[in-house]
Amino acid sequence: MKKLLLAFCLFTTGVHAQSTDSVTIRKIYNEILTNSPSYEWLRELTQKVGPRLSGSEGAQKAVEWSKQLMEKEGFDRVFLQEVMVPHWVRGAKEVAYIRNGKQKITVPVAALGGSVATAPKGVEAQVIEVKSFQELRDLGPEKVKGKIVFYNRPMDPTKLNTFEAYAGAVEQRANGANEAGKLGAVGAIVRSMTTVLDDNPHTGGMRYATGVPLIPTAAISTNGAELLSKSLKENANLTFYFKQNCETLPDAKSYNVVGEIKGSEKPDEIIVVGGHLDSWDLAQGAHDDGSGCVQSIDVLRTFKALGIKPKRTLRAVMFMNEENGLRGGVGYADYAKKNNEKHIAAVESDNGGFTPRGFGIVGTAQQRAKVMPWKPLLAPYGLHEIGAGSGGADIGPLAQLGTVLFGFKPDSQRYFDFHHTGIDNFEAINKRELELGAASMTALVYLLDHYGL
Amino acid sequence: MKKLLLAFCLFTTGVHAQSTDSVTIRKIYNEILTNSPSYEWLRELTQKVGPRLSGSEGAQKAVEWSKQLMEKEGFDRVFLQEVMVPHWVRGAKEVAYIRNGKQKITVPVAALGGSVATAPKGVEAQVIEVKSFQELRDLGPEKVKGKIVFYNRPMDPTKLNTFEAYAGAVEQRANGANEAGKLGAVGAIVRSMTTVLDDNPHTGGMRYATGVPLIPTAAISTNGAELLSKSLKENANLTFYFKQNCETLPDAKSYNVVGEIKGSEKPDEIIVVGGHLDSWDLAQGAHDDGSGCVQSIDVLRTFKALGIKPKRTLRAVMFMNEENGLRGGVGYADYAKKNNEKHIAAVESDNGGFTPRGFGIVGTAQQRAKVMPWKPLLAPYGLHEIGAGSGGADIGPLAQLGTVLFGFKPDSQRYFDFHHTGIDNFEAINKRELELGAASMTALVYLLDHYGL
């Protein structure tokens, strides 16, 4: 009977906790869907601050803007963490065309971040089209030497999650110049990373391997790639021309920006929620990753607005330099390690400001199991996809400290329409979708704070 | 032992069936995500055919377009079902302004479908703002007589599903003129049905009750509503002016358009998949409901493309006149009843061409239970929300014949940004999201056909 009574008490306590949690989570959604300033914050970050590639004036303005915002919101502590970041600049706008007989057809192009410039007069050569590194290697140096290698493997449209399709294609952008350079190519161009056929070139990071010739590399739009491929079938001897003026300057001083609410019971246990403050230079970085920044700040704002005093210490972290170096993410983890900080969990939003689907978890099976009882609390808000998955680039280095990582997972269908292009601007954001993301993250952080891991 | 063996056989058969189904569903998604012409069909329907309000030339063109398309796709039978539809025309563009002292501030306005015109010189009167019918009734005729009633209850932004928020506000549009007319008002204007603050008035249907004075009624944009409300707080004596030139002509002859693939085993059991062919007149009707039309045709196309011979008869139905009469939906059910047709299931897509979330089911608990084992087959495609819910307006009348209704449920967050406005155009559609909707519907129809209900 005692056992039964105990079981009953545990059961009712459990029910009571669930019901209190569900009331709190409803309050979180109500607060954010009626009062959140996140959309207006994003308008400022994207339209007033603007593009903010690491090392740029925009990045510095973004550091100041987010510091001031978190101070104005009255967080307990707001501080900067210095990091040295790569400083790559695009220079004058790139030019590219296909020269096919007497025709010269312009192709939308963007240098890849990290690439060297072409010679001032540009580079022009015949083109070798391949779909994979293996195909390129099979051709061998004699077929590649002096040519421009054109990587044209599309993202697989049958992948339901577009990030999987991206993962299956992005090596062409990241390593294409290395593979082509090794075989004597004079340039590498890559089909933009998107499933859409349009005229927007998608830039993105690349890094030269040690010891390979530094050949210039750029992305062309998917329509441009289709045209080039078709033209090559008609005339294998056509040439491609591109000219770019980018440059890597000495590393620049920059900062992660951190806002904190001190925990009331276990202040030494830290929960991070963050996004990255830097963006590419072609647009305002609205989905990538202005959204994640304002959502993260909104998490802490919402705790304050609802008078929820966290047991643990909450930190909103604006990471610097996700796009072309990850120095902010690495620097943050170094700082945490050096100071013996205990980070129990980190949540990142860096998959766009779209309608929420769930969270990916990086942790042990036991840690994931601890999260599963929360699923019924989150399902009414469209958060059905909660399980093993990806965390986020910036929080990745925290894994070595035993931190459990959570990647906010919005719907992925539209992300690569905008990613790294000139149209990733404020207009691409839907206010409700942005807010629902912030609310989802706040609900998760509330549960993490309440129950620990 | 025999029992065990039987259980084992049943188990393995079950597993085998699931695995065959999962392979087929994967093929359906692959086919649609790589080969579907639905996006190009929608481009034609929206940009070439254009707006298609019941009784208009556009509606007639849409009938011909969809008939020809389904014939070209080689369906076993394509036929028209005559229905008489209301024929309301907007006439010259509406004008509205707030006259506040010497200021005249223009407000974006659209007559509601079914409304009468104002007098040729328009109507101008003082304004009574209310949030509910009760509030209006409490004011009584003495306060309302000779005034324009302004319904300003917003859609509730805290509802996760925006259709719930719509359901909680739309009576103001549908019945506002009746309630105001009864109390002697000279006009009724309503805040547009959306959670967004912008300058797009949202039209939509209204119907005069028997015996009430026919007063003109229109929607104003949410920004206009906010301005009017604010201005009224400063000056309760300001006046509102609007002029509209709409007219209800005699009923016109129109059609449902039906395409059919004959069942190979149970041809007498029919499964319908449909959307509505008519749209409002302000835009191209891309989300409402060009999407549902092309997705439905794509379901049948996909069966053919994959060589799946349905056991039961499949029909893609383009319903006419959902927006302001439902004559097509009613007429289709009448036709089915008259011909003793057995419709086992009907699936409608009329909630926009957005990323799929699931299906609402209208049927008995037993019928819904039959669907539940399919959930694991559909979950990998983001279809998590499958259960009791809404079907669709056009298929609604089939319920009386015992048909189980399925409402395709895409993500609802952006729907009311476009619904019944001038911006519900082709550009508002994302190709992948549209295709995923078609694939979700095809997968469901495949299971319905395979297992029955």
Image (cartoon, coloured by chain):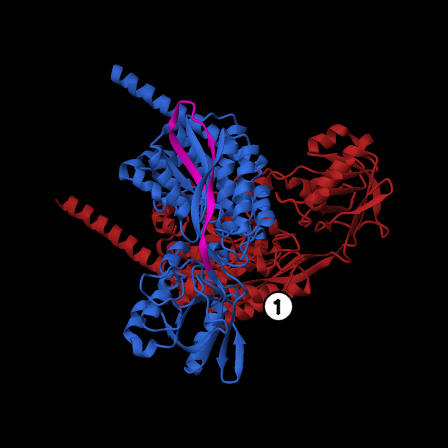
Chain colours: A blue, B red
Q: Percent from the top left, x then y, of residue A358?
A: 41, 43
Magenta stretch encompasses residue A224: no
Residue B36 drawn above or below residue A300: below
Q: Percent from the top left, x then y, of residue A13?
A: 37, 22
Q: Chain of mark 1?
A: B
Residue in the image at 41% along x and 71% along y = A187
The answer to which image quadrant residue B56 occupies is: bottom right
Give the number of callouts: 1
Q: Percent from the top left, x then y, of residue A404?
A: 34, 38
Q: Which residues are magenta?
A: A248-274
In front: B404, or A139? A139
Residue in the image at 47% along x and 43% along y = A255
Q: Type of residue at label 1? A: Lys
Residue assigned mark 1? B48
Magenta stretch encompasses residue A259: yes
Quadrant of the snapshot with the N terminus of chain B: top left
Q: Percent from the top left, x then y, of residue B159?
A: 54, 38
Task: Name the outermost residue toward the top.
Answer: A2
The secondary structure that most of the magenta stretch takes on is strand
In front: A57, or B370? A57
Task: Name the outermost residue toward the front.
Answer: A250
Residue B197 visible, this orientation: yes
